[in-house]
Amino acid sequence: MELFIERGFEQTTVAEIAKRAGLTERTFFRYFADKREVLFAGAGTLQEFFVSTVASAPDSAAPIDAVAAALEAAGALLQERHEYARQRQAVIAAHAELQERELIKLASLASALAGALRRRGVTEPAASLAAEAGIAVFRIAFERWINETGQADLPQLIRDSLDQLKTVTAGKLGRELPVRVPGQLRVPGRLRVPGRLRVPGRHRPGRESRRRRWPPRPAAAA
């Protein structure tokens, strides 16, 4: 990671990475297919952790709650690596190919979570919906965590994001509320301008009566 920060991802070579790590290039390629994989080395471990945590959730746990338990447990593990995570994400954000690889990793995590839920007896599409929603919660909480200064708590951010998701799906956020002007009658979806209330019974001329003839018709001769 230090080399990527010092020299830039594009300029850093495999030979330089291997030398910094005290390895030969041959040894490096035993563990990594290319230098991109250095940034995603922990993806497999994280996936296994997600799956095992979902599998160990109580039988009574709802699908989304089993996923949430896995997300929070993973967040606790990542909490101590805030600076590394921030630097890693900065490198990824600067390169489209790395962003694509990150999306592939997240898709793999969602697929693994859905499989773990199906093994618990959760049917489709509930398993995939819970898994995809969980990964969306994790991604948003993770982005907030790395962008906040200070010691933000990742598990708490995950819980907050999940609560927001539940609120949105319950229909409590995002509704368009009626516009109300103080002192005016409430008309859903319509704004009343003060001083322009319609008076019942008042004659409103039709279009024809309001239309003026032009040019004016000459007055009849006396």
Image: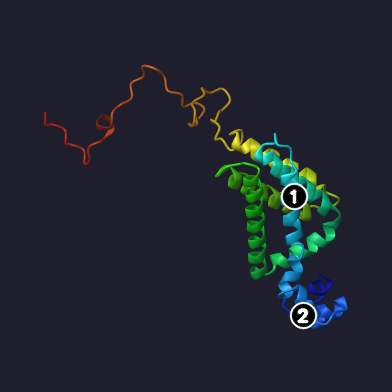
What's the distance in space between the residues labelled 2 and 1, CA to CA? Answer: 34 Å
Query: Which amino acid type corresponds to the residue marked 1 in the rendered image?
Result: Ser
Quadrant in which residue 10 is drawn: bottom right
- Foreground residue, 142 or 54? 54
Query: Which amino acid type corresponds to the residue marked 2 in the rendered image?
Result: Val
Mark 2 or 1, which is nearer the eye?
1
- Foreground residue, 187 or 201? 187
Q: Is residue 81 left or right of residue 132?
A: right
Q: Quadrant of the N terminus?
A: bottom right
Q: Residue at x 55, y 44 (%)?
A: 124
Residue 52 numbered tag: 1
* Vertical comparison of 149 with 10: above or below: above
- Foreground residue, 134 or 199? 134
**SS of the residue under disc 2:** helix
* Vertical comparison of 140 with 40: above or below: above
Q: Residue at x 13, y 31 (%)?
A: 220
Q: Quadrant of the C terminus?
A: top left
